[in-house]
Image: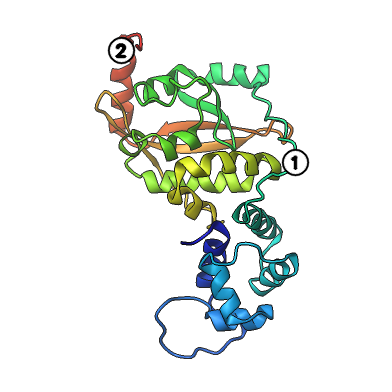
Amino acid sequence: MGTPLGDFVRAKRDSIQPESFGIPDRGRRRSPGLRRSDLAARAGVSVEYLTRIEQGRDRNPSQSVLNALADALSLDAGERQHLRYLAKITGGGTCVGRPRPEPLDRDVRPTVLATLQLVDPGVAYVANRLGDVLAFTTGFELVMRGSGLLEADAPNLTRYVFTDPRAREIFPDWGQLADERAFDLWFGPSIEISEWFTAELAPLAGEEFTRRLNRHLPPPRVPLRINQASGYALCWHRETLELPATDGQVLVVLLPADDTTEQAMDRLRRRPLRAIG
């Protein structure tokens, strides 16, 4: 059975074209990317040892081995930090002896709330990169009403996508959104906070989450399709506006991508809302 560390090393190896490292093409092979023997040679370890790491049979490689693998895979600074984190959780040392970091500030500045009011009754929300939904317009509530997302005490889009079965029905392009949420989590807001959130979510979300988290490639930005609970199939363009770094938040505005969505929203706004529960 694999481990997060082994899965990451193998995925990175498979993503590398040998020619990019000056290694000649040796003909057809069963899997893409860099051969295990080539990576082992670059890292200065045996093929057998690299195999044990990738297959999860060695869970405690030394720091020198991790550094050698990082060099051999040409990891950037963010990927090296992630490699160290994966080694930590693979070896069973997740956050041992470390205080839990302070949670992100969930307060939204008054001027940002005022901006949401200007957008209303359009569809928009404020979130952080963990996926916490911190504020939203009545239009966003209308779109997501009945999905289960906003019914949580502290709505979190990342947790919802990976752990709530309804998410796969609400978002027909679930895989695309899952890739986006995993990338945003890896991208920020801080290493410590992301590590804690990941450690808490991974056991619930399983392999779908871990595999996507290890990709580190920004997913393509495509329209967001939503199957609204009332039966409308909606399609949206998204504009994501980064708020100041001290906020650690983004303002996301959804704009109708077609006439069908615009007409559906007009009908939804004319429909009286019913209380939930």
The residue carrying mark 2 is 270
Query: Which residue shows up at 52% across the image and 40% down it?
Result: 201
Query: Element type at marker 1?
Result: loop
Query: Element type at marker 2?
Result: helix
Vertical placement of residue 71 versus 219, above or below: below
Q: Position of residue 157 (x, y in %)?
A: 48, 33
Q: Residue flagged by tag 1: what amino acid is it?
A: Arg
Q: Position of residue 110 (x, y in %)?
A: 67, 16
The residue carrying mark 1 is 98
Query: Which residue shows up at 75% across the image and 41% down it?
Result: 98
Residue 202 appears in the picture as rendered: yes
Q: Position of residue 261 (x, y in %)?
A: 32, 31
Q: Quadrant of residue 251?
A: top right
* Circle 1 crowding by C-alpha within 10 Å: few under 14, some 14–19, many from 20: few
Query: Which residue shows up at 72% across the image and 31% down it?
Result: 102
* Circle 2 crowding by C-alpha within 10 Å: few under 14, some 14–19, many from 20: few
